[in-house]
Image: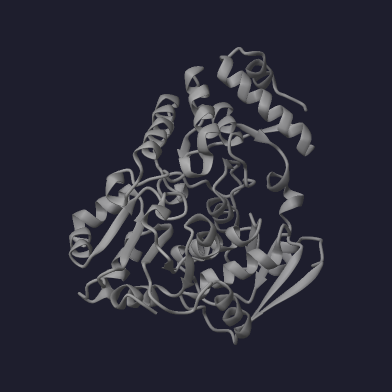
Amino acid sequence: MILSRAEEAMLAGAEGEARKLAMEILVKVGDKLGAQRLVPVSSAHIVLAMYKSIYEAGVEVCEKFAAMGARFKVPTTLDPSGMDTQDWRAFKTPEPYAEKQLRVKKAYEQMGAIMSWTCLPHFTGNAPRFGEHVGWTESSAVAFINSVLGARSNRETAVLDVCIGLTGRTPEYGLHLDENRLGTVLVEMKIGGRELEGWEYPVLGYFLGKSIGGDIGVVDGFAGAPRMDQLKSMLAAAAASGPLALVHIVGITPEARTRAEAFGAKSPTRTITVTEETLKLTRAEMCTVKNGKVDLVAVGCPHYSIVEVQEVIRLLANRKVAAGTEFWIYTTKQVRDLAERMGCYAELSALGVKIATETCMLISPVETWGFKTLMTDSGKCAYYAPMQCKTDVIFGSTADCVEAAVRGKV
């Protein structure tokens, strides 16, 4: 690898042992990936943050770097915590589990992390601009910033993300290079030229993720002007059901103002067609059961915006959650604070809805509740919940979820 003088100095230990170790890891990984050099990044986002996913080894990594006096070189945000940060006892988090999560928190505080605890750093003050290089790990965030903002990041891995934050560098390979961002697979929308309904965005994303795989898709025929929340849910599902990190949406992605621009000099290697039947079959595939009693309705994966919180209130129409059913909304501390200020939090609480803060159902110990069936409007949750939450899953629209919460069943 070709290193700059500043990078050679970090590798030699001129900026401390922690940064030296981080550079050693980055150089070894970069060599294996065939990167010729490191590229400076303006920010990092860390997935090595929740105990449920990182276990003892991850806690040790965090504490090792902190003990070495590590300090982040670029703004570095954190993925959701492994438990509700405001009231973890209310969500039946075991004490030993909480103790380990709090150790992770302390280590990152010592390293100077931005304690954002969200999968949406780009919605909470850390949005990269078009063409900007960053080093992020959260799959849904990487898919969003590549596909909607035109920023550049690979789907980095745990531990490597910490090294990126400590050095402000990442190996220059994959989506950091122009030639690797051109489309290879054409996806044609054949649904009569209509706009997608709200629930169809995560369904389309789920289909794209498993159909495109590691290729770069170009979606043409996308009607209307989808909201950021809709693109958020679509790309989160796409990044869950497959290794997708970038998909060009013609007319939305900055690098895909036209189909020709998205492909450059390349021709598509294959064509995928999305029809009404495609969406119908994919929705069915996202459910492990079709109906029955619902123990938990969980929404907010990715974290809900205040607009989505307001929509739940509108759909509830002053109806209470059924006895024997839990209804949880996952969101950021900022949105929770807004909800309290606007009276939304009190209104939801009175109807039996809980707001879980800075975590999500997939990375917190939901299994301690013994739920059998979970319902969600999240394509990402639908994909992971059978394994992470140990439940059956029913996917539906937000309206479907609210009705299930009120009735206690589907």
Q: Nearer the viewer, residue 135 or 410?
A: 410
Q: Quadrant of the C terminus?
A: bottom left
In the rendered image, is residue 35 in sight?
Answer: no
Q: Residue at x 67, y 13 (%)?
A: 12
Q: Is residue 141 above or below residue 39?
A: below
Q: Is residue 178 left or right of residue 222?
A: right
From the top left corner, tell me how far across and down residue 355 is, in percent: 29, 56
Q: Quadrant of the N terminus?
A: top right
Q: Is residue 81 above or below residue 264?
A: above
Q: Residue at x 45, y 51 (%)?
A: 120
From the top left corner, tell me how far across and down residue 288 is, in percent: 53, 72
Q: Nearer the viewer, residue 311 or 132?
A: 311
From the top left corner, tell me how far across and down residue 107 is, in percent: 43, 27
Q: Which of the 4 image quadrants contains residue 405? A: bottom left
Q: Nearer the viewer, residue 116 or 195?
A: 116
How many numbered discs, if any? 0
Q: Is residue 188 above or below residue 63?
A: below
Q: Residue at x 59, y 30 (%)?
A: 163
From the top left corner, tell me how far across and down residue 341 is, in percent: 19, 54
Q: Is residue 57 above or below residue 14?
A: below
